Image: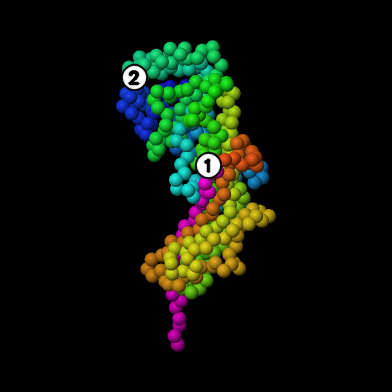
Amino acid sequence: MRAGLGVGTARPALWTAAALSLCMALGVGTPAYAGDPSYGGDEGDAQPTPPSSDTGSGGNSGSGTIGAHIQLRQSRTGGSGSATAKATSANANWKPPVCWYEPMYTPDEYENFIKSAYKGAQEPAASYAEKRAAEDYHKGDKGLWWQVQFRNDSYTDACPVTSANWEIWVPPAQPKADPNQLTPEILSGLAYNSTKLPKPPVVLSPSPDRLKVNLGTRVKLDGDFDRVWTTASINYKGVQMAATTVATPVALHVEAGTPDADPGTCTYDLVKGEKGYTVDSKDAACNVTYRHSSGTGTYPFKASITWKVTWTASADPDGPAQQPALPDGLSTYEQNVTVKEIQAVNR
């Protein structure tokens, strides 16, 4: 048992004087949780495991856990073989869920947990244990105790759960769900936050260190992509729910890295081909032509793929799309390029 979870999961963003003294009274620090290395996590991200056998465009590429019992599983990232990185939200204001309640204990298990974790505790922890004892831990009632879980230890946003209710009682016929109780929508945000997207394998011709002034630079996306989806699910003590985020590549955006280029930026639509989504700028009017040398320095060339992200309220990526919508995702390739003047030979 991960002793102390009931109170030790208080994070700095939550800590009031009462919450801090509650933990001190118990004599426990913050406990191990799924984001700790000992539990195979990394600040709430899915941890990769060796790929299993290919099962098509949705073949498994990794799995992991978050919280207490939430499982994460992501599809493979297409046939390009390019490097991957965590998806970046196109909406800077979007934030993944900070905390939520998960099913944890039956009444008897909760009684054992409270009596063990709070044994000999001082105030205010002693009062918290007495409050639960006065409720008789809901022994004999149908339902479960749900406990607050945290996505990671970054503390960038305050969790709305207070120290008065590290756990909540959830009966089978719950009149009104707690706003922080785990839902498919919360799972979709956790899945989005754990999604890894392939970086665009852009090839420049000429090579990045040999670009010439007034000589067109061909920008080619050297690879095909397919959809990427991540499923977050829970199946614990009879509570089953899942959500799947689906990222579909829709556009390639190129930035030359200087206003002295024609054009400075451009965007290509990605189209579905036999092997996935792709684009080739060979015959497009958007090949980049640099008009001035980069001198002794370089220009920061950048290419980004925009991914349209939807989610379903199940483990099926082809299920009905749900609301509220998730923001677009971005994966980015960056390369410093050197542009030199063409040297003329005088005879």
Is residue 190 part of the magenta span, yes or no? no
Residue named by callout 1 = 192
In the image, the segment drawn in magenta is: 325-347
In the image, what residue occupies the spot 60% across and 36% down?
313
Q: Nearer the viewer, residue 224 or 325?
A: 325
Which color mode does the image show? rainbow
Q: Residues within 10 Å of mark 2 (few under 14, many from 20)?
A: some
Q: Residue at x 49, y 54 (%)?
A: 332
**Label 1 SS:** helix
Left or right side of 128 for 284 = right
Q: Residue 193: in sight, yes or no?
A: yes
Whole-percent x, y for residue 72 in the image? 55, 36
Residue at the spot x=47%, y=44% of the render?
A: 94
Residue 104 horizontal/vertical position (percent): 51, 23
Residue 120 percent across, percent down from the top left: 35, 14
Q: Is residue 344 magenta?
A: yes
Residue 173 lies left or right of residue 126; in this view the side is right
Assess whether mark 2 and mark 1 are in contact (beta carbons under 8 angstroms).
Answer: no
Amino acid at the residue labelled 1: Tyr
- 91 above or below 140? below
Q: Earlier in the sequence, mark 1 or mark 2?
A: 2
Residue found at the very far bottom of the displayed protein:
347
Relative height, residue 293 to residue 324 (above, below): below
On the picture, is 123 further left or further right than 243? left
* Mark 2 residue type: Pro
